[in-house]
Image (tube, rainbow, N blue to C red):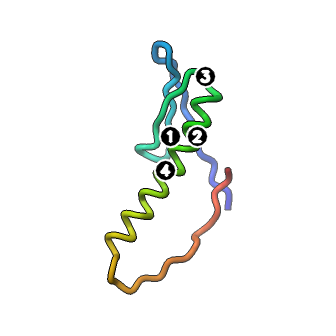
Amino acid sequence: MDIPLSAVYVQDGDWIVAWIEEIPGVMTQGKTIDEARANLQDALQMTIAARRELTRRKTQGQEIVRREAFTAAP
C-alpha cells in the first residue's frame, strides 16, 4: 500500500522550514529544498524509530502481537 505524504516547504529568513503535513511533529529545516527534503526524510525515520521505542517501553512485559501493517512509499 502506498501512502502519499505531503511535504510543505516555507522560506523563513535564510532557512527553508519543512514538515510532513499528515504527521504532526515531523519537522526540520535546510538551506535548500533538497537539503530540507533530505533532513525531512531523516526526521521521519527518527520519529518512527522513537514511536516504536515508546511502544516497546509502554508494553514491556505484556504479551503483544506485532506485525508489519504495510509499507509506505519512499
Asked if marks 4 and 3 touch (Cβ < 8 Å), the reply is no
Label 1 or label 3, whichever comes before in sequence order = 1
| Disc 2 to disc 4, C-alpha distance | 18 Å
Q: CA distance from mark 1 to mark 2?
A: 6 Å
Q: Residue furthest bottom?
A: 63
**First in sequence: mark 1 or mark 2?**
2
Q: Earlier in the sequence, mark 2 or mark 4?
A: 2
Q: Quadrant of the rendered structure where residue 24 is?
A: top left
Mark identifier at residue 32 = 3
The kind of residue on which mark 2 rests is Ser
**What secondary structure is found at the residue carrying circle 4?**
helix
Q: Label 2 belongs to which residue? A: 6
Left or right of 55? Residue 8 is right
Residue at mark 1 = 21
Amino acid carrying label 4: it is: Met
Give the Cα distance between marks 1 and 4.
Answer: 17 Å
Badge 2 marks a residue whose secondary structure is loop
Residue 2 location, x and y as percent?
Answer: 67, 56
Determine the secondary structure under disc 3. Answer: loop
Q: Amino acid at mark 1?
A: Glu
The circle drawn on residue 46 is 4
Who's the residue at 47% across and 47% down the image?
A: 23
Alpha carbon separation for disc pair 1 and 3: 19 Å
The residue depicted at 50 percent of the width and 77 percent of the height is 66
